[in-house]
Amino acid sequence: MSKSVRMGLGLLGGLLMPAVGMAETQQELPAMTVTANKIEQRQEEVPASLSVLQGEDLRDAGVEDLEALARRTPSFGFQPFGQSGTNVPVVRGLTSSATAFSSSMLMLVDGVPTLMGQGFDNDLLGVERVEILRGPQSTLYGRNAEAGVMSIHTRQPGDEPYALVDATLGSRDKRSLRFDLSQALVADTLYAGIAGEWREQDGFIDNAYRGGDEDDRKRHNGRAVLRWTPAATTSATLRYSRQDYRDGGSQWGAAGAARRELRSGTASWNHSSGRSLSLDVVHELDSGLRLRSITARNDFYDRVRQDTDFLPADVLHVERDHHLSTLSQEFRLEGEWEQSQWLLGFYADRDDHDLDFRQKLPLGLTRTRVDLGGNSTALFGQWTLPLASRWSLTLGARVEQDKVRLSPHDGGSRSDEWQRFTPKLAVQYAWAADAQLYASYSEGFRAGGFNAFAASAGYPGYDPEQVDAYEIGLKGWAADRRLRYSAALYWMDVSDMQVQQVVQPGVVYITNAAEARSTGLELEADYLLGAHWRVQASLGLNRTRFERFRDGSADYQGNRNPFAPDLTGYLGLRYDAAEGWYAQAGLSGVGRTYLDPANRYSRGGYGLLDLSAGYRFDHYGLAVYVENATDKRYDAVGYLNGMARVYSEPREIGLRLSYQL
């Protein structure tokens, strides 16, 4: 029996674990209201595979980045990239290239979109909840939501003063200070909040040539919010956030270097930064209709220099100076008619890229300077109506037009455009008072574009990627509402799949050269074992294979899509004592992941064990934690078509002190 199968059976056993010694206390798990469909619904009413993680649970578990967040949910992860500020998501086996200027998953932070891997990052500071929708969501969210949506909702300031300060000391001289503060400036009318993080940590990759650590990390983040409620029916929220990275190099080394050591003579660094400004206005009309407007500007400055030969001599390195900005506007009108709910919306955005890419090669330096841009406009709507007793129907549609343009600094501008109609259909049946069955059909797509990094090939273009998905699922409550469960079975066909091809040495670009199929099963459970114990578990089984893919003379039909594991899983156990102390353990697992379409290079399957324990008294808290307690190595060997190894992070032990008002 394979390791992946054994791991899957073990995690499935966690889902079915009996409540030995369960107390008679009839406690309940809290009900959760979500906005996954852009209207307020109970979590169990959403006809889709949906995970909801509460901010308090994430903070107690020490989850402060998106990779740790993803490990707690099924069929969701990230490519091993090793660079702060850039994360390329993988959902149900679908992902994108870091050079594609698009993403298979859309990230929203308080409604502000991030459309690509650069800037796909968040420190989860002051988070109220995170909603993760799996499966195509392009009907409501448009392009780059072909495999899912992650929506992060931060805490809103209110009448009561709020303060949370958290200081951490850990391995490799880790020092971290996080705070989240808010106060009413004018009672019932004007509120303000501010949050921030300062974090520094030494690296773990030794540079034996120049001395010191190669991958030190420094991160400074901040967020400010001003909320105005002139009337009970109106609110306006102004938000500003920024992120600054002052890191060493990426967590890369030579593919054959098993030790966390390199001999690089070329300085590597990451000086990226991000900015976001948004205005969110909500008004409820006398007729009961609700109007919402979200206006946002999102900027990310991707400034990186990275050695890629890992040798004392400067033979190969890359340097990237990339400014990308997105200006977006969304209007939504929602209401109820008899027993049905409906939503209409308009969305428009404009994104601009200024790219300066330099590559050191043995024969000299190459430089690519291009301006890219695009704009998108869309009309969308969704209607949920009852059909009969216990039956309901959800219908949705979106009409979108996308335009892209490319202007190299050496001349030869190009442009293209696409129109897309994206429908959705879902049927629900309430087979019990607290249980739902659903079946759905949905479509998704990922934006097309131009290969800005392929100057020598004439910057070829590629078309949007299309996904047709079928899903059936069930979700609900059991055991006197101490158990919340969900299950989803899906089938997704991918056409015009965007894949990276090596046309000739030094010429690598994206084309629509493949078709694929993704099938899988997702299970989740949250079980309250009496008064003090809680179990959380998830399991994702996925099979993503190329149905057609020829790269020159090579035929990859039947191969696995890169970065798509067949297994993801999580099992967490927590104990809360009446005296104020607690302990928790979390085990996450990922199956073997291939790094290239030929399936020559891979990262083996692995499991990570995280432990923590703490004590709360008055307004204070003290906790100790261990991340990757077994010091598991899970390097991605053969990244960049066999050129590099992405090192996995070692065990970290730390102490956390907090104060909460």
Image (tube, rainbow, N blue to C red):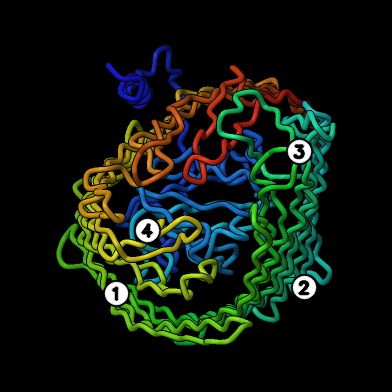
The span from disc 1 to disc 2 (Cα, nearest Å) is 40 Å
Could you tell me how far apart the alpha carbons at marks 4 and 3 are, in whole angstroms? 34 Å
Q: From where the camera sits, is residue 619 visible?
A: no
- SS for callout 1: strand
Q: Secondary structure at mark 2?
A: strand
Q: Is residue 17 left or right of residue 196?
A: left
- The residue that label 1 is drawn on is 422
Q: Position of residue 249 (x, y in %)?
A: 73, 45
Q: Earlier in the sequence, mark 1 or mark 2?
A: 2
User: Are there few (<14), some (14-19), or many (20+) residues within 10 Å of tag 2?
Assistant: many
Nearest the viewer among 250 and 488 is 250
- The reply to whether residue 135 is visible in this rendering is yes
Relative to the observer, which residue lies in front, 435 or 308? 308
The N terminus appears in which quarter of the rendering?
top left
Kindly identify which numbered label has been placed on residue 312: 3
What residue appears at the point 40 percent right and 52 percent down from the top-left corner? 43
Q: Secondary structure at mark 3?
A: loop
Is label 3 in contact with label 1 (beta carbons under 8 Å)?
A: no
User: In screen coordinates, is 220 left or right of 523?
Assistant: right
Q: Mark 3 or mark 1: name the one nearer the start of the chain.
A: 3
Q: Amino acid at mark 3?
A: Pro
Side (left or right) of 498 relative to 68: left
Q: Position of residue 160 (x, y in %)?
A: 76, 57
Tag in front: 1 or 4: 4
Image disc number at residue 499: 4
- Tell whether label 4 touches label 1 (CB within 8 Å): no
Q: In this figure, which residue is indicated by the disc labeled 2?
A: 190
